Image (cartoon, helix red, strand yellow):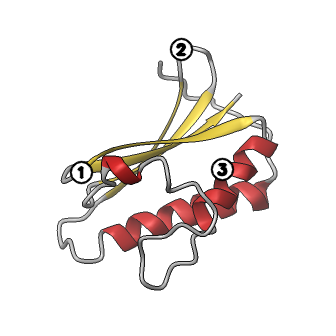
Amino acid sequence: MEDQNLQIEIDEKLISQVMLNLLKNSADALRNNPAGEIELSCKKNAKRQVEIDVKDNGPGIPAELIDEIFIPFFTTRENGNGIGLSLSRQIMKVHNGSLRVRSTPGKETVFTMVFN
């Protein structure tokens, strides 16, 4: 559902932190992909909730790890601390929203911020 005038009430600093974390994760996933792309989109869903998607064409997240990525201190990166996605999900909950993920390994990963 396309809407040119999407507005949400947020704590700009906290939501900026979520966006920064999602973008950094996408950039990290694409570091060895010269054809890597990150796409941002925003829309209202069928429930009239605003959704912001951060999509990349990186290696994806294996199905066996998808439920673990939001657990504090879980990380698959050598230099990661496992805090970013857990904190991002909590920030979205504080905003009465949610943070979802879907991934097709070898094709794409999409993180969706949903604002009620």
Identified at 80% across, 39% down, the residue is: 9
Residue count near mark 3 (Cα–Cα under 10 Å), binned few <14, some 14–19, many ≥20: some
Q: Which residue does the numbered mark 2 point to in the structure image?
A: 46
Q: Which residue does the numbered mark 1 point to in the structure image?
A: 105
Alpha carbon of mark 2 to alpha carbon of mark 3: how far? 22 Å
Identified at 81% across, 44% down, the residue is: 94
Q: Mark 1 belongs to which amino acid?
A: Pro
Secondary structure found at label 3: helix
For the residues carrying marks 2 and 3, which lies nearer the camera in this image? 3
- x%, y% of residue 56? 33, 55
Secondary structure found at label 2: loop
Alpha carbon of mark 1 to alpha carbon of mark 2: how far? 27 Å
Q: Mark 3 belongs to which amino acid?
A: Arg
Q: In this view, does 27 lie above or below 10?
A: below
Identified at 48% across, 22% down, the residue is: 2
**Count of numbered circles on the image:** 3
Q: Which mark is residue 89?
A: 3
- x%, y% of residue 115? 68, 34
Secondary structure found at label 1: loop
Q: Is residue 11 left or right of residue 116?
A: right
Q: Mark 2 belongs to which amino acid?
A: Ala
